[in-house]
């Protein structure tokens, strides 16, 4: 059964009234375990809102946990054990839908819980269609795309078909070890039109076709997983692969901050959303809700874009995005949503993957083992 924000708030208040709130005394420091992805993304969160919030609230200590890649499985296990230790979890949109449907994420009233835009626009309107679940609090728009070593390829890749062309672009590739994105890219490289991708994948023949295309490069792929997303970046930096799929923000850091000989290939980047969910039964609900209101306001989401090339999820934040806080470069050309970068973009189908992820992950893992 889903737990609403209003129900949970009342429960906390009642517990506090009889001394069982678990919030701690005024002099004690409350630790909030905030789960995210690590790397450049967690660093952007730390600089944009964790550190400023703790500076303004000395009674709060935010502890980072980089377990978002396995959040669904771990929350299921915590729930079964009756011991939810995570206060707040950063997840992709599809995982938020699954966790909400399973009653592991709290349903919220976005307008009641979150700050309005500076002009008074309610949060639900400011985030708009990016609220893909009643449990989901959007933060950023990002993409999974490709980086390649400019010094290790004779011909720069320009299309998704090049990723699957071992003659044109010889050498090892790195892809994320999951069916999502890889099946879509395989079909695009095999000539399927973008607006037909999920129709084709809804058939056994379509799934077979995608795996057959992946077969053509399987022995040249080094796999990385979401829990260790830095693997793809390290493989590129070390020259162990010539091209790799990766989150655009991590590639930005590799190129602009680390000055590595790497360039971006934006063809058929896959857009996705990332945001918070509050675990049902998690600790320190009152403190968590205060932090989330702060961390997702217009200014804080714009501030995050100063440190990483992910687009803020609030419409009101976009005009406030300017230069990188440390590099001093204009961030707009590095955003996945920039018109020059988004000429061919695949929109991630959250509902479809929420319905099909478990079955296709089982098929994908069996394929890997062959």
Image (cartoon, rainbow, N blue to C red):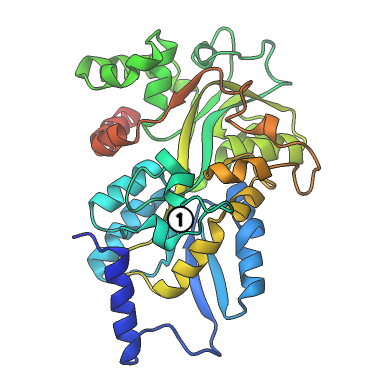
Task: From the top left corner, tell me how far across and down residue 257 is, in percent.
Answer: 75, 41
Residue found at the far front of this picture:
119
| Left-right relation of 42 to 221 | right
Determine which residue is flagged by label 1: 67
Q: Residue at x 62, y 27 (%)?
A: 338
Q: In this view, does 330 lie above or below 242?
A: below
Q: Residue at x 23, y 22 (%)?
A: 202
In this view, the residue in front, 358 or 330, is: 330
Task: From the top left corner, tell me how far across and down residue 131 is, in percent.
Answer: 39, 45
Task: From the top left corner, tell me how far across and down residue 136 is, in percent.
Answer: 38, 51
| Quarter occupied by the C terminus | top left
In this view, the residue in front, 269 or 315, is: 315
| Left-right relation of 223 to 82 | right
Q: Is residue 193 above or below residue 320?
A: above
| Quarter occupied by the N terminus | bottom left
In this view, the residue in front, 313 or 122, is: 122
Is residue 213 among the parts visible in the rendering?
Answer: yes
Q: Residue at x 60, y 13 (%)?
A: 158
Number of marks drawn: 1
Q: Residue at x 30, y 58 (%)?
A: 107
Residue found at the far right of this picture:
328
Task: From the top left corner, tell me how far across and down residue 261 is, in percent.
Answer: 74, 28
| Left-right relation of 215 to 207 | right
Q: Quadrant of residue 182?
A: top left
Is residue 238 among the parts visible in the rendering?
Answer: no
Determine crowd level at label 1: few under 14, some 14-19, many 20+ residues with C-alpha closer than 10 A: many
Q: Label 1's element?
A: loop
């Amino acid at each position: 059964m889903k737990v609403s924000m209003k129900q949970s708030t009342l429960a906390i208040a009642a517990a506090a009234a009889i001394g069982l709130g678990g919030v701690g005394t005024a002099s004690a420091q409350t630790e909030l375990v905030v789960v995210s992805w690590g790397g450049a993304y967690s660093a952007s969160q730390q600089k944009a809102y964790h550190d400023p919030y703790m500076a303004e609230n000395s009674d709060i200590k935010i502890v980072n946990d980089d377990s978002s890649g396995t959040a669904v499985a771990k929350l299921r296990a915590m729930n079964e054990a009756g011991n939810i230790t995570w206060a707040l979890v950063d997840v992709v949109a599809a995982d938020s839908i699954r966790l909400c449907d399973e009653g592991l994420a709290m349903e919220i009233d976005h307008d009641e819980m979150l700050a309005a835009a500076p002009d008074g626009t309610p949060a639900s309107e400011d985030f708009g269609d990016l609220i893909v679940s009643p449990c989901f609090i959007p933060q950023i728009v990002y993409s999974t795309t490709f980086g390649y070593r400019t010094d290790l390829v004779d011909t720069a890749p320009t299309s998704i078909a090049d990723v699957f062309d071992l003659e044109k672009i010889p050498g090892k590739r790195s892809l994320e070890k999951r069916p999502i994105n890889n099946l879509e890219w395989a079909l695009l490289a095999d000539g399927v039109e973008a607006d037909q991708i999920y129709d084709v994948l809804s058939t056994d023949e379509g799934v077979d076709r995608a795996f057959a295309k992946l077969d053509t490069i399987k022995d040249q792929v080094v796999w990385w997983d979401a829990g260790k997303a830095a693997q793809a970046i390290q493989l590129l930096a070390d020259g162990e692969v010539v091209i790799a799929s990766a989150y655009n923000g991590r590639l930005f850091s590799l190129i602009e901050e680390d000055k590595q000989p790497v360039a971006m290939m934006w063809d058929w980047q896959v857009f996705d959303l990332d945001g918070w969910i509050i675990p049902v039964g998690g600790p320190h609900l009152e403190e968590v809700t205060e932090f989330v209101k702060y961390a997702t306001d217009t200014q804080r989401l714009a501030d995050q874009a100063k440190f990483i090339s992910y687009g803020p999820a609030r419409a009101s934040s976009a005009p406030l995005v300017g230069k990188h806080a440390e590099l001093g470069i204009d961030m707009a050309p590095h955003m996945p949503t920039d018109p020059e970068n988004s000429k061919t973009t695949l929109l991630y189908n959250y509902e479809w993957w929420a319905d099909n992820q478990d079955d296709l992950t089982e098929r994908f893992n069996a394929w890997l083992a062959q």
